[in-house]
Amino acid sequence: MSSAERDHQAAIEAAKQLIPSVRQLFSGWPATGPYMPNMAHAEADLYETSGFADPRLVLYTGVSRWPGLTVGWALFGAARNVQPGHTSLPHALQEALADPEAVRALQFLAADHKETDEAAAETLSNPRTVRTLVDLASTAHANQQGQALRVEVGTELYAYHSGPVPFGTTAADVICIGSPIWIARS
């Protein structure tokens, strides 16, 4: 392991001490839900979906499992511009991007700036927008052909949606929507 890799791993370990695990965050589930927005970390089996009009935008979908709680992930990577209707995305994803509020939420999530983080959280207070992004992530997850990568992920969480929700071959108890702070091999 190089010095840079050790430094990166040390930074992740330090960050993990400052933010709760997803399991801690949802410890009262389903009786109580956590405060949003928030930050959390967990291990997850993640897939990557690209093909958006802006190639910098990436969607990570995945699942984390514990006894009594299955969490689905919808994490959107950084970009400045989201355009609906890009032809390389599956049709069902294109349909989800026809919702202007969902596109607006993705634009905020993708910008990676304090003001847009606050705007993303505000936009995602609309349950219809959250449901659209959950449908988008669920469709993307179901369309994955490759192997999931087992990773450790730290994320800003902007919203969650109560399940059970079909998520690939899994029924998730809750879907978390956010933007990754780090993704590292676990």
Image: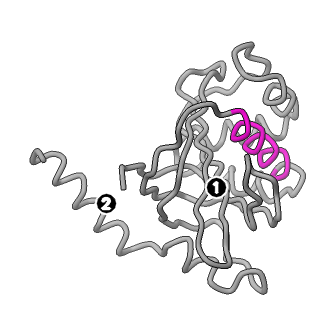
Residue 102 percent across, percent down from the top left: 80, 40
Asked which quadrant contains residue 33, the reply is: bottom right
Left/right placement of residue 163 relative to residue 17 reads right
- Label 2 Cα neighbours within 10 Å, binned few <14 / some 14-19 / many ≥20: some
Residue wearing tag 2: 12
Q: Name the residue at 69% across, 57% down.
A: 121
SS for callout 1: helix
Residue 129 percent across, percent down from the top left: 84, 48
Outermost residue, top side: 87
Colour style of the rendered protein structure = one colour
Left/right placement of residue 185 relative to residue 174 reads left
SS for callout 2: helix
Nearest to the observer: residue 155 or residue 143:
143
Residue 58 percent across, percent down from the top left: 57, 33
Q: In this view, does 162 lie above or below 124?
A: below
Left/right placement of residue 167 relative to residue 126 reads left
Tell me the chief SS of the magenta region. helix
Residue 61 percent across, percent down from the top left: 62, 45
Q: Name the residue at 68% across, 86% down.
A: 28
Q: Does the magenta portion include 9?
A: no
Indicate the amino acid at tag 1: Glu
Indicate the amino acid at tag 2: Ile
Asked which quadrant contains residue 72, the reply is: bottom right
Tally the numbered discs: 2
Nearest to the observer: residue 86 or residue 49:
49
Q: Is label 2 or label 1 in front?
A: 2
Q: In this view, does 76 lie above or below 38?
A: above
Question: Which numbered disc flags the more N-terminal residue, 2 or 1?
Answer: 2
Nearest to the observer: residue 167 or residue 20:
167
- Segment tinted magenta in the rendering: 130-143
Left/right placement of residue 63 relative to residue 127 reads left
Residue wearing tag 1: 118
